[in-house]
Amino acid sequence: MKLVIHGKNIEITDAIREYVHQKIEKAVSHFQSITNEVDVHLSVARNPRINPRQAAEVTIYANGSVIRAEESSESLYASIDLVADKIARQLRKYKERRQDHKTHAQPTEVVIPESIVTDLIGDRTAELPNEVVRTKYFSMPPMTVAEALEQLQLVGHDFYMFHNSETGEINVIYERNHGGYGVIHPRNANGQTNGKNGKASHTNIVMPEKSHSSK
């Protein structure tokens, strides 16, 4: 298993490196057969008004899936402890889902086309940073909407970008404020999409009650 440690506004001392190895290796010890690489990002906020200031983020690449956890606190060591516990829980859920997929059929999805969404921010004011502060690269293997939903739940974000294996498009699946999940499709300049019906650029996914995990 490959473990890489990055630091932002902090020096990665031997003591910190040893502590990360100890905690993260223990967290993934029961899942090394499915873990390919572990990326640990430690950071300290320079702005004293930001509280908590010390954060630990762990990203695990496991057989084509990405599992992510992040925690912050006043102490870097406490943040490492918290994120180690959290990533262990995420790995356990991932392994259980894989086992369930082998023994049970996938739950049925109900995809309900909605009207084209022209305003995604409503009354909110769009604000962009003055500059790009971080760039990320990740592999994007083709997957279904159901597989993308699983990835969304594993990485702990509100949205997940993926390569739709059914349409060949780059789509975004996201968690809706009023429950359920939505999928955003690209639309050509002529207003058409590559979807099956060629009309909807936004769909809503309603999952069975037992498979929906709330934050």
Image: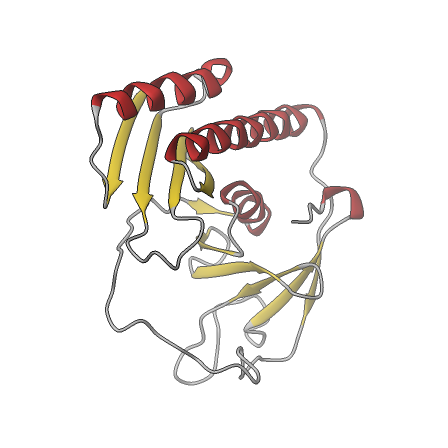
Q: Is residue 169 placed above or below 4 in the rendered structure?
A: below
Where does the N terminus fall, quadrant-wise? top left
Pick the front one: 107 or 52: 52
145 and 127: which is toward the camera: 127
Q: Between residues 36 and 13, which one lies in front from this camera angle?
A: 13
Residue 158: x and y in percent read 54, 56
The quadrant where residue 182 appears: bottom right
Give how far across and how far down residue 215 sits, in percent. 65, 49
Q: Tell me: residue 132, above or below residue 30.
A: below
Instruction: Residue 8: give x, y in percent of width and height.
Output: 24, 45
> For residue 200, which quarter of the picture?
bottom right
Left or right for 215, reference 94: right
Q: Residue at x 77, y 48 (%)?
A: 208
At a point 32% along the width and 51% down the height, the residue shown is 45
Horizontal relation, residue 32 to residue 113: left or right: left
> Residue 19 at what x, y percent from top left?
34, 21
Q: How many marks?
A: 0
Q: Residue at x 70, y 23 (%)?
A: 103
